[in-house]
Image (cartoon, rainbow, N blue to C red):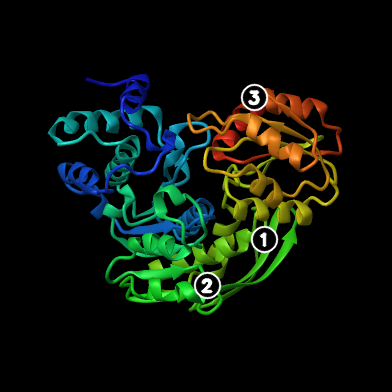
């Protein structure tokens, strides 16, 4: 057989997709299925070194920056991230290019032949994780940058042994799976740390330090102690950073990503790259790698007049970062229209408080294209409590059209609340 992409997509769709399920775990989590699946493929995740990235916020951007830095050093780099914005292919990339339809269909067909040997059906995420590991081995990457899907210890990506483990930060999120305390979430995320590895720890709360100290890393590099973003200035189209690692200092490094929080992500990524090489990186290569970094859907400018920005902030911490970025980088757009769609488990009052409603002329509430979508009526009710005019639209595309059409040329349209909303908005704006 030679599957078409459509056949491969149908195969994926026939499995349970936990990203579309809104419920507590009904049984103990396990790595048994993914372990068996990778064993049957000769454990491809052990055929190249891994940089493993987790964190409550910023892990996708950190993975993207780390990938760019490793490429600048001349390495062939596989990158696995989630979720995707528009097409599932985005999750698996090689030197920044998503896997082709044909290559993805081929590797999923291989998995379909293996699956009957399993005791249980794998989930969609497990299949995609196994596909990434297999594809990276097939194209012979020099290193893989692997982003955790959820948590750490029980995430399917954790069958890989990261030479470098990165924890960007620890916040309260996904409590239905990870628990309600930062200590418990830290413990879950520390599970990606493997014996002999270097842990690049972006979380600076001293109360959580013992959790990570006990994780078993050979070395722990701590943000603001061993590495840091020491200066973080607004620049045209991004940030100008002064960065320090255990081995070097890099001044006036340009990063074409919006938001002061990206300085911390850049510091983590640079430290991870230095830990991987066990040596500093040449300053010109750091400048090249940082300047080439891209993180779609994270404070991404996709239109002008009106200014349209997409940001996948999906929790209050991310929403606060988005609000701070807008205030600093786009102060001329004092009036804005907010396109907002949330998933179940998100409190719309908390999200609006974090985003800030000062200057918001209108909220357009829409449902993310997910079975976990929070009803727009709940977003509308929160908007009413905040004293902001609101309209409900039954699709992201319709919401984007309405927002852009009603916006004045000098206004800002922010699309946020979920990466599912951002992905659908990207497609809608492209069609315009």
Mark 3 residue element: helix
Splitting the image into 4 quarters, where does residue 196 fall?
A: bottom left
If the image is split into quadrants, where does the C terminus sit?
Answer: top right
Q: Is residue 11 left or right of residue 386?
A: left
Q: Quote the CA–CA distance across marks 1 and 2.
A: 19 Å
| Mark 1 lies on residue | 260
Give the label on residue 397, or none: 3
Considering every residue shown, the one lying at the far left of the view is: 117
Q: Which residue is at the front of the view, 174 or 248?
A: 174
| Disc 3 residue crowd, few under 14, some 14–19, many 20+, Cα 10 Å | many
Q: Quote the CA–CA distance across marks 1 and 3.
A: 30 Å
- Residue plotted at (72% across, 65% down): 233
Sequence-wise, the earlier of marks 1 and 3 is: 1
Sequence-wise, the earlier of marks 1 and 2 is: 2
**Residue 308 visible in the picture:** no
Splitting the image into 4 quarters, where does residue 3 fall?
A: top left
- Residue plotted at (54% across, 37% down): 343
Where residue 173 appears, as percent x and y from the top left, is 50, 52
Reply above or below: 432 against 389. above
| Disc 1 residue crowd, few under 14, some 14–19, many 20+, Cα 10 Å | many
Where residue 39 appears, as percent x and y from the top left, is 16, 46
Q: Which residue is at the front of the view, 170 or 105?
A: 170
If the image is split into quadrants, where does the N terminus sit?
Answer: top left
Where residue 153 appears, as percent x and y from the top left, is 32, 57
Q: Are marks 1 and 2 in contact (CB under 8 Å)?
A: no
Mark 2 residue element: loop
| Mark 2 lies on residue | 205
Q: Is residue 326 left or right of residue 167?
A: right
Q: Quote the CA–CA distance across marks 2 and 3.
A: 40 Å
Reply above or below: 304 against 237. above
Q: Nearer the viewer, mark 1 or mark 2?
A: 2
């Amino acid at each position: 057989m030679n599957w078409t992409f459509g056949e491969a997509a149908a195969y994926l769709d026939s499995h349970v997709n936990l990203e579309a399920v809104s419920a507590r775990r009904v049984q103990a989590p396990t790595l048994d299925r993914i372990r068996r699946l990778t064993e049957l493929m000769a454990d491809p995740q052990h055929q190249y070194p891994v940089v493993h990235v987790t964190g409550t916020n910023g892990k996708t951007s950190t993975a993207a920056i780390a990938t760019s830095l490793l490429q600048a050093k001349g390495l062939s780099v596989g990158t696995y991230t989630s979720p995707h914005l528009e097409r599932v292919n985005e999750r698996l990339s090689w030197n920044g290019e998503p896997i082709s339809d044909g290559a993805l269909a081929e590797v999923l067909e291989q998995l379909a032949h293996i699956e009957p040997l399993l005791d249980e059906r794998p989930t969609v995420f497990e299949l995609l994780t196994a596909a990434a590991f297999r594809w990276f081995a097939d194209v012979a990457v020099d290193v893989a940058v692997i982003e955790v899907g959820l948590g750490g210890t029980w995430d399917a990506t954790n069958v890989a042994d990261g030479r470098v483990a990165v924890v960007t930060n620890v916040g309260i999120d996904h409590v239905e799976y990870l628990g309600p305390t930062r200590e418990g979430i830290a413990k879950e995320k520390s599970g990606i740390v493997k014996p002999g590895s270097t842990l690049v720890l972006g979380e600076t709360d001293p109360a959580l330090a013992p959790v990570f100290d006990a994780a078993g890393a050979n070395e722990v590099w701590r943000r603001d102690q061993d590495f840091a973003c020491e200066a973080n200035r607004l620049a045209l189209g991004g940030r100008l950073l002064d960065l320090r690692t255990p081995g070097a200092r890099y001044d006036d490094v340009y990063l074409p990503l919006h938001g002061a929080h990206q300085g911390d992500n850049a510091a983590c990524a640079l430290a991870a790259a230095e830990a991987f090489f066990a040596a500093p990186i040449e300053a010109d290569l750091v400048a090249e790698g940082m300047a080439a970094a891209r993180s779609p859907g994270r404070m991404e400018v996709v239109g002008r007049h009106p200014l349209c920005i997409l940001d996948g902030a999906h929790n209050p911490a991310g929403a606060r970062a988005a609000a701070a970025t807008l205030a600093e980088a786009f102060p001329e757009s004092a009036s804005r229209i907010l396109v907002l769609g949330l998933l179940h488990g998100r409190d719309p009052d908390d999200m609006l408080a974090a985003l800030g409603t000062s200057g918001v002329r209108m909220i357009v509430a829409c449902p993310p294209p997910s079975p976990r979508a929070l009803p727009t009526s709940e977003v509308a009710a929160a908007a009413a409590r905040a004293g902001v005019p609101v309209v409900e639209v039954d699709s992201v595309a319709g919401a984007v059209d309405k927002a852009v059409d009603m916006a004045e040329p000098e206004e800002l349209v922010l699309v946020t609340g979920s990466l599912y909303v951002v992905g659908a908005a990207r497609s809608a704006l492209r069609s315009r």
